């Protein structure tokens, strides 16, 4: 079930990288997986983020595209292009045959683009799409229009079409992106939001180019570190013979039980998890919106998938033990309160009982998240700082919030500086939560105080 998949991913803290990149062959698989061709690997991150592929793509990516799949792809193109609010035109699509051939797929996608005033769109499907680089023929220029189209070929066409139109219109989410320099070393700094919502994809070309230009891409945690992931997951669960019911009130436990049933995990499906792990999961789920897909690809995970698929070196500035220890060290009282509040917000988002106080909290949370994403998408750190009052966060008496920064920002500044001091000529990319970039005590000002040049990417 999709709900079960989403909550299990959230409980893991990160999505399994195998679902976002080319997967390793599993010995126990009964059917040979369908792996993407080398030319399609570079599109996987965007394809996943846009909803063109899901976790089971190795069961169909090399198969002929079906009409149902093509209709879904066409809808994704239509929805993404509609967001650009381009001047519209009357599309002349008379005689265009939509079927499972390469030409039929091109016609289906062209119909979506032909509704807008785009350069060259009046030239017809083949000329328009070839001009954008969406389709490329062989050495003779043959587009093989009559050949059956695989899902992979259609996916690549859609990915290229959306990105080409967005790039031509200087569109896409720009992200909070800075560039730090020291001698021949460059360090891109991306402040991320650990969510997928507000139509955040596709990302702007300047952000994609910065990832592609870097040799090493670093995160808070290495999402590819299986040993670290296992360690973090072990921290989330009880290993002393107790269960969740032994650590929270009976009333709260019953609400968790109801949620376990609602997401398809059955009775006692969440009993092994500690309150802080469930609270973090429920909090993330409560902040989803109508644009959050079943893939729920947080920005950090997109960057990781793009980097891994491009063969970049992956690094991290923290360990799972360190980050997990911050949560696992919370007092039992705080964990229970955290779980209670997070679950209440999720219950209300799912149409449950409305409590006036929690309703106000939910409205404030939604307003804050939308404003944060608006600032993130337009690369406006001042607007982001106005919404996200970091000073209030780190000076509050909240047991968790202050630890998230006071115990971590100095180490992140030190790690960022170490990249800039690397011998030789290098380009690095560091993606961590946006709260760690902004002041007080953020990485950007921290590097400037150390004498490095740091500028917002134009």
Image (cartoon, grey):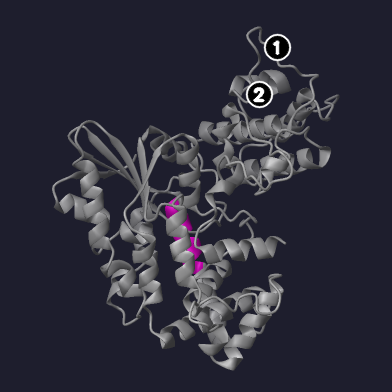
Which quadrant of the figure contains the C terminus? top left
Q: Is residue 370 magenta?
A: yes
Q: Is residue 257 above or below residue 226?
A: below
| Image-based side of 145 in relation to 384, left or right | right
When asked about the image quadrant of residue 108, the answer is: top right
Q: Give percent across and percent down for residue 360.
A: 53, 80
Can you identify the residue that label 2 sits on?
A: 129
Q: Give percent across and percent down for residue 358.
A: 55, 83
Can you identify the residue that label 1 sits on?
A: 142
Residue drawn at x 22%, y 61% is 410
**How far is disc 1 from disc 2 in space, using C-alphas?**
13 Å
Which stretch is magenta?
A: 367-376
Q: Is residue 351 above or below residue 47?
A: below
Front residue of this view, candidates 393 and 21:
21
Q: Is residue 226 magenta?
A: no
Q: Is residue 373 visible?
A: yes
Spot the residue most to the top.
140
Front residue of this view, candidates 18 and 452:
18
């Amino acid at each position: 079930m999709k709900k079960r998949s989403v909550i299990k991913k959230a409980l893991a803290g990160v999505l399994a990288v195998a679902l976002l990149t080319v997967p390793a062959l599993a010995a126990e698989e009964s059917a040979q997986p369908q792996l993407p061709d080398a030319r399609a690997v570079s599109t996987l991150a965007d394809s996943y983020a846009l909803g063109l592929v899901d976790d089971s793509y190795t069961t169909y990516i090399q198969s002929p595209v079906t009409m149902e799949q093509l209709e879904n792809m066409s809808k994704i193109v239509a929805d993404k292009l509609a967001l650009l609010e381009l001047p519209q035109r009357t599309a002349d699509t008379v005689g265009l045959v939509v079927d499972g051939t390469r030409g039929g797929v091109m016609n289906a996608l062209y119909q979506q683009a032909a509704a807008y005033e785009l350069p060259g769109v009046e030239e017809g499907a083949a000329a328009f799409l070839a001009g954008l680089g969406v389709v490329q023929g062989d050495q003779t220029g043959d587009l093989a229009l009559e050949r059956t189209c695989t899902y992979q070929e259609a996916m690549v066409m859609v990915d290229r079409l959306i990105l080409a139109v967005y790039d031509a219109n200087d569109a896409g989410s720009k992200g909070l992106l800075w560039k730090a320099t020291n001698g021949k070393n460059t360090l891109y700094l991306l402040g991320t939001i650990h969510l997928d919502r507000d139509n955040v994809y596709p990302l702007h070309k300047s952000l994609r180019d910065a990832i592609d230009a870097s040799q090493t891409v670093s995160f808070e945690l290495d999402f590819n570190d299986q040993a670290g992931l296992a360690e973090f997951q072990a921290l989330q669960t009880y290993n002393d013979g107790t269960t969740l019911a032994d650590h929270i009130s009976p009333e709260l436990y019953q609400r968790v039980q109801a949620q376990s049933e609602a997401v398809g995990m059955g009775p006692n499906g969440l009993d092994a998890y500690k309150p802080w792990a469930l609270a973090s999961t429920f909090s993330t789920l409560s902040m989803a919106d109508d644009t959050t897909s079943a893939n729920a690809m947080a920005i950090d995970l997109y960057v990781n998938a793009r980097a891994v698929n491009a063969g970049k070196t992956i690094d991290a500035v923290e360990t799972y033990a360190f980050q997990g220890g911050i949560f696992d060290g919370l007092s039992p009282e705080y964990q229970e309160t955290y779980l209670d509040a997070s679950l209440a917000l999720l219950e209300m988002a799912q149409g449950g009982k409305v409590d006036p106080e929690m309703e106000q909290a939910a409205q404030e949370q939604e307003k804050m998240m939308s404003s944060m994403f608006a600032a993130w998408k337009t690369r406006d750190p001042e607007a982001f700082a106005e919404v996200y009052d970091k000073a209030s966060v780190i000076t509050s008496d909240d047991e968790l919030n202050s630890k998230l920064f006071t115990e971590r920002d100095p180490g992140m500044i030190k790690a960022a500086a170490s990249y800039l001091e690397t011998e030789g000529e290098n380009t690095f990319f560091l993606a961590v939560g946006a709260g760690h970039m902004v002041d007080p005590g953020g990485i950007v000002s921290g590097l400037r105080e150390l004498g490095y040049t740091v500028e917002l990417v134009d």
